[in-house]
């Protein structure tokens, strides 16, 4: 039974590394991140459940101590405290809907996976896990390359041929993923000469030609993402890997191996130069395209968003506003200059800088513990800069594993993992983490620690197995029940989103009755999601107006009350969610066509939204329109003048203002 638990843990990690980057579905509200997060939760439950049963069967606690214990505990503790004092606990717990990664549940999941990995995976299993990572990434990159040539162009609104995103969902996310894994291809190309692991049943080797091919696929796809942050992160990873390697060899005066490494370095550099030359049109020179499309450069927008993030932190310095609450808190202190950009009416739910995002949402304590994880892992790698050339023989279950030049071989892998890890850090300075790359952030250190362990097998049996008493059987049964319950609950979350996505399609097709049915069904499976209640409220308001138009005033009034009730539920769960307030204002405006009393409610809602987002020009514009409908012309002109001040090139606002003044 213990061996079975080991196998469950082992293959679940293989599935985690292989399937999470690949999975997406066309049936959900968010095609990419939601499915990756759901799969991560499912596999986490299975892994942790098998690990707990294994501990019960072995009658011992099997938790491996690591150098990151204190920083991880601090990181989890400060995120939990930030959740307790969050302005929106629902969002802080589950994550922002459509992003999902970053909520407290996801952080707990990543940390549990980290400890499950270091406590259960052997070196042999870890090397296989890396292989699954690399070949899964090859599939992702091949799909990205095919996207560049138009394989799925008709399915996306985005210009996918211009900037590919493959199964990751966004070009910068794909670039970060490829940058993290590229150094492993360099490492294994070097290990083929000095690293051997042999056994009758087990042979681990990636041929040089395959390493070169994998890297070429990754790099070409990276070029097609046109991600400037990705190219910069790649350069940092490349310099760190080869710089550390050659410095190590020079310090140890291993000139023969340095000569061999130099050959590999020249081969990889030649691949980079050749592909860069062939794909030079794919380099991230987007300024001309952006200028033609009147798109504000992303660097200019980031500076504005970063300033807003710092403004929020100044008001919530210690624990922030709560994990994943940037979408709510940013608009309280959003710089007016944001209105001068092409994305002036976008809702920003991330700071587009992972460090500022943590600073804003979890305060200096959350960011400090996050940076402590990074600092200790980097320090641990640099501290292990000494090597000893030795031949290590280990006998496990009558099989001999011979590792030649073991320390140097695994140190090359450490360099590769560290380089990929730093590539993540550089990329995150201009973006933010996703489910896939956060798995790497927490499990790259775990892999490094496992590769340092010379035992090769975590929990080999000593002596004869002992019989279990009834209490332990009962505990195993309870855990199995808990696993089944959690898996079922997670599947319900997925199905609720599936129903919600169907409802959204019916709303777009102007079929509010069918949409309402699906929204209600989604709520039946996940009652706590405020977005479901908000959309049901909006659909109900459209139905109320339709019924009123058919002279069914009584039924229309009942439907109107239901719409208001659903909107109240959504704002009770997430009171500072700007999109929910905007939907409520729209809903009340629809109801005002049936009963003018709702105009005042809509006005109060927009005033509340304006208080939460004082520099949002669109809210100000709609507020002016509503004042005009209520006959308060002077107040409407005053608000519209403010709108023009917020956004001087707002043509619709200037037109209305001119019309009203001329009346």
Image (cartoon, rainbow, N blue to C red):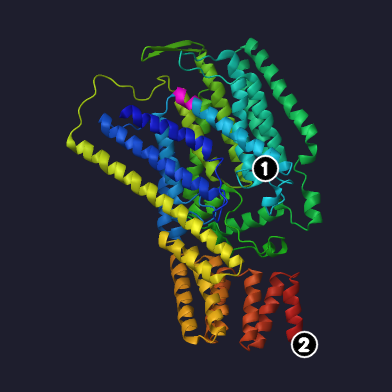
The image quarter in which residue 114 lies: top left
The image quarter in which residue 277 lies: top right
Q: Which residue in the protein does label 2 denote?
A: 662
> How many discs mark residues in the rendered view?
2
**Residue under the image location 67 percent in, 24 percent down:** 212
The answer to whether residue 564 is above or below residue 414 is below
Does residue 16 belong to the magenta stretch?
Answer: no
On the rendered image, what quadrant is the C terminus found in?
Answer: bottom right
Q: Residues within 10 Å of mark 2 (few under 14, many from 20)?
A: few
Say left or right for 324 vs 624.
left
**Residue under the image location 75 percent in, 86 percent down:** 661
Q: Which residue in the protein does label 1 denote?
A: 229
* Residue farthest toward the left in the current orientation of the protein: 470
Chain part drawn in magenta? 123-127
On the rendered image, what quadrant is the N terminus found in?
Answer: top left
Q: In the image, residue 73 lies at what x, y percent? A: 40, 42
């Amino acid at each position: 039974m213990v061996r079975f638990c080991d196998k469950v843990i082992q293959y679940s990690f293989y599935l985690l590394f292989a399937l999470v980057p690949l999975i997406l579905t066309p049936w959900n509200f968010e095609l990419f991140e939601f499915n990756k997060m759901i799969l991560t939760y499912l596999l986490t439950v299975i892994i942790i459940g098998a690990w707990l049963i294994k501990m019960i069967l072995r009658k011992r606690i099997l938790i491996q101590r690591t150098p990151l214990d204190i920083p991880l505990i601090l990181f989890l503790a400060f995120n939990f405290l930030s959740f307790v004092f969050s302005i929106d606990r629902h969002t802080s717990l589950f994550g922002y809907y459509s992003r999902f990664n970053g909520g407290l549940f996801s952080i707990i999941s990543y940390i549990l996976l980290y400890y499950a990995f270091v406590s259960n995976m052997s070196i042999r299993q870890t090397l296989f896990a890396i292989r699954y990572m690399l070949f899964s990434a090859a599939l992702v990159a091949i799909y990205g390359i095919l996207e560049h040539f138009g394989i799925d162009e008709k399915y996306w609104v985005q210009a996918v041929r211009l900037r590919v995103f493959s199964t990751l969902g966004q070009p910068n996310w794909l670039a970060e993923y490829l940058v993290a894994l590229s150094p492993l291809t360099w490492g294994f190309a070097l290990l083929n000469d000095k690293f051997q692991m042999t056994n009758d049943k087990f042979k681990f080797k990636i041929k040089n030609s395959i390493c070169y091919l994998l890297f070429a696929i990754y790099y070409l796809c990276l070029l097609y993402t046109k991600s400037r942050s990705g190219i910069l992160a790649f350069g940092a990873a490349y310099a760190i890997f080869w710089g550390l390697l050659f410095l190590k060899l020079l310090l140890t005066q291993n000139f023969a191996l340095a000569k061999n490494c130099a050959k590999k370095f020249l081969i990889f550099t030649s691949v980079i130069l050749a592909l860069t030359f062939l794909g030079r049109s794919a380099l991230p020179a987007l300024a001309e395209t952006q200028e033609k499309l009147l798109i504000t450069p992303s660097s200019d927008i980031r500076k504005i968003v970063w300033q807003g993030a710092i403004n929020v932190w100044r008001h919530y310095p210690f624990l922030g506003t709560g994990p994943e609450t940037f979408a709510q808190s940013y608009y309280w202190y959003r710089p007016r200059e944001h209105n001068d950009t092409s994305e002036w009416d976008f809702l920003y739910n991330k700071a587009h800088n992972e460090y500022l995002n943590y600073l804003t949402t979890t305060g200096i304590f959350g960011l400090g513990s996050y940076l402590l994880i990074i600092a200790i892992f980097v320090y641990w790698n640099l501290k292990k800069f000494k090597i000893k050339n030795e031949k290590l023989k280990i006998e496990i279950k009558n099989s001999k594993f011979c590792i030649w030049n073991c320390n140097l071989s695994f140190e090359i892998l450490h360099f590769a993992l560290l380089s990929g890890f730093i590539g993540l850090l550089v990329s995150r300075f201009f973006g933010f983490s996703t489910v896939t790359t956060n798995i790497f952030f927490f499990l790259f250190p775990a892999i490094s620690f496992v590769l340092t362990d010379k035992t090769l097998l975590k929990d080999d049996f000593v002596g004869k197995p002992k019989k279990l008493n009834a209490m332990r059987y009962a505990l195993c049964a309870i855990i199995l029940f808990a696993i089944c319950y959690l898996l079922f609950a997670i599947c319900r979350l997925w199905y609720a989103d599936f129903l919600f996505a169907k409802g959204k399609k019916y709303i777009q097709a102007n079929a509010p009755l069918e949409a309402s049915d699906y929204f209600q069904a989604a709520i039946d499976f996940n009652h706590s999601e405020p977005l479901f209640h908000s959309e049901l409220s909006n659909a109900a308001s459209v139905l109320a107006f339709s019924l009123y138009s058919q002279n069914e005033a009584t039924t229309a009034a009942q439907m109107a009350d239901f719409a208001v009730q659903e909107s109240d539920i959504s704002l009770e769960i997430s009171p500072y969610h700007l999109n929910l307030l905007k939907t409520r204002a729209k809903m009340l405006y629809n109801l005002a066509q049936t009963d003018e009393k709702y105009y005042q409610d809509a006005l109060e809602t927009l005033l509340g939204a304006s208080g939460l987002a004082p520099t949002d020009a669109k809210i100000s514009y709609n507020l002016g329109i509503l004042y005009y409908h209520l006959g308060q012309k002077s107040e409407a002109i005053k608000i519209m003048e403010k709108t023009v001040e917020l956004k001087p090139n707002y043509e619709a606002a200037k037109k209305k203002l001119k019309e009203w003044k001329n009346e």
